[in-house]
Amino acid sequence: MVLRIHNTLSRSLEEFVPLCAGKVGMYVCGMTIYDLCHMGHLRMMMAFDVIYRWLRTLGFEVTYVRNITDIEDKIIKRALERRITLRELTDEMIAAMHADLAAVGVVAPTHEPRATDYVPQMLGLIGQLEKKGLAYRSPNGDVNFAVRKFPGYGKLSGKSLDELRAGERVAVLEGKQDPLDFVMWKAAKPDEPADATYESQYGPGRPGWHIECSAMACAMLGEPFDIHGGGMDLTFPHHENEIAQSEGASGGPFVRYWLHNGFLNVDNEKMSKSLGNFFTIREVLKRYDGETLRFFMLRTHYRSPFNFSDVNLDDARTALRRLYTALDGVAAPRVDIDWAQPQAAAFHAAMNEDFNTPLALASLFDLASELNRTRSPQTASLLKALGATLGVLQLEPRAYLQGGSGVDEGAIAALIAARNASKQLRDFARADAIRQQLAEMGIELKDSAAGTTWVKA
């Protein structure tokens, strides 16, 4: 059975055929790293973690790039508030992000480029666009993209230029020839710190957000590449602008398949600090183990709106315990999956239909029901093997049911590594926070000259 995925560009399900047989290049817009990651961030990273895992299960060699934006207005503002350098802030937040993702079983991408390491490539791309007449220098020192000079602008979001103009709420900003134009290079301002400024042919400044992803994606995956992903909120303007920049410079296609995950709501309302329903991953992990949180998110299709609530989390925890209870007491030797087996075939068909995890999980519960009747090691092995493709059911059942840590040894090791990195950066507050996070998962650390070991408390 072929893999079909929903392509935002065509607004339809399409058979997935990579550019190079057996290989996939995938780029996902990652974090602007100025604070702890919240549940909306996890929604996106979980969606593409599942996609990454399934592509590898199908036998593809996947090059997965998820970038880090480490130069941006919010980062500069937060570093100034804390009186630390941008690098100190972003290093701290990256370590925290890695620790939080490890606790939920999100695997690391193949590459995780930082925007500040690709400024020369960004400037090269801007230079190409300027030569083609698609970029212009503003009197204030910025360099902008001329949207109306790029044919096809709006094809991803489905919006025409006239519709976009009709929705304007602000006047043309100083230096822009058209309100739709967007900045690719921001001229340095007198009050900005020195480490936020880079030299260029346009004078001192820093890159705009959109040019960062175009440059990093093309530098690491070539052009065109197979899959570009991110949250639905990035469809416009971020991804639309990426297409305009990249295709405007190359003259050819940028990406073949665009994938976007659905929004996250909290108790059916948009998550917002002003509404008091804003939660970081770390806050949720204080109340629920990482595997429960992961399983909870798998129960909603990645493109559907996701409703976060304690009631739904409690229900997910109960459902996950049912699967572990079925596995408890039955030997489950590691096996290769027999995809001809009925439940495995149903699981495979569900995942190949645009990564339908809710339907795939139904196959796991069918297996669990069978296991409760037969206590068959073969059925238990298949249940664990299918769970592994989604990153669940890999703990010893008795250990999970008694302790409910929901964190495997790999996740614990990643958290310890993040703590060690924080200590090397002399960020002892973050190191202590990670130690406390592990303690709340039932893991006690023992430091010695030989390194750090752990035991289940």
Image (cartoon, helix red, strand yellow):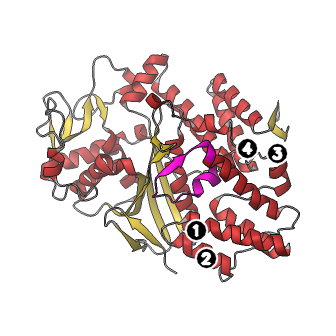
**What number is the disc on residue 412?**
4
Q: Amino acid at mark 4?
A: Ile
Dots 1 and 2: beta carbons under 8 Å? Answer: yes
Q: Amino acid at mark 3?
A: Gly
Please identify the quarter of the rendering in which residue 16 is found: bottom left
**Cβ–Cβ below 8 Å for labels 3 and 2?**
no
Question: Which residue is label 1 attached to?
Answer: 359
For marks 1 and 2, the one nearer the N-term is 2
Q: Secondary structure at mark 4?
A: helix
Above or below, 72 against 247 in this view is: above
Q: Nearer the viewer, residue 90 or 387?
A: 387
Crowd around label 2: few <14 · some 14–19 · many ≥20 (10 Å): some
Q: The residue under label 1 is which amino acid type?
A: Leu
Q: Which residues are magenta?
A: 294-311
**Location of residue 122 (image quadrant):** top left
Mark 1 touching mark 3, by CB under 8 A?
A: no
Toward the left, the furthest residue is 177
Q: Which residue is mark 3?
A: 403
Residue 293 lies, in percent from the top left, at 64, 48
